[in-house]
Image: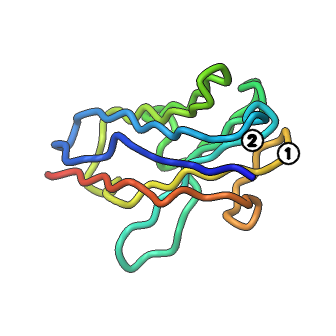
Amino acid sequence: QVQLVESGGGLVQAGGSLRLSCAASGRTFSRYAMAWFRQAPGNEREFVTAVSWIGGSNAYADTVKGRFTISRDNAKNTVYLQMNSLKPEDTAVYFCAARNQWAVGVSSADYQYWGQGTHVTVSS
């Protein structure tokens, strides 16, 4: 069982940056692939990025590639999402997710554990 708590959301102007954090409980954090998803009002939850067990493999949605970076610190049981060059269309609730496999997944159905989400608002 893994419990996830996101933090770092807030209000930022377009072009700005934010770093989200996701703290995980459990001794086997390093055995979980981790991901970030987001959901804007009226939209379905969408994949943003994911990282494998030891960070050797990752994936990004085309909409964030080159602007967002996922990383993990297994010693701190934490995964991060560095978001640069933010756009108003990045406004959403951002969710951290975990799956008990080494490889990344890009569908929400691939992940068994979810945080409560953190709000990100990008003003124009």
Q: Are marks 1 and 2 in contact (CB under 8 Å)?
A: yes
| Side (left or right) of 38 relative to 104 | left
Q: What label does residue 101 carry, if any?
A: 1
* Residue reaching furthest to the bottom: 42
Q: Amino acid at mark 2?
A: Ala
| Residue labelled with disc 2 | 33
Residue at screen point 24% across, 47% down: 10
Q: Position of residue 43 (x, y in %)?
A: 44, 75
Distance in Å between CA atoms under marks 1 and 2? 6 Å
* Residue reaching furthest to the top: 75
Residue at screen point 83% across, 41% down: 103
| Side (left or right) of 48 relative to 109 | left
Q: Is residue 109 above or below residue 79?
A: below
For marks 1 and 2, the one nearer the N-term is 2
Residue at screen point 76% across, 25% down: 54
Q: Quadrant of residue 16?
A: top left
At mark 1, the secondary structure is: loop
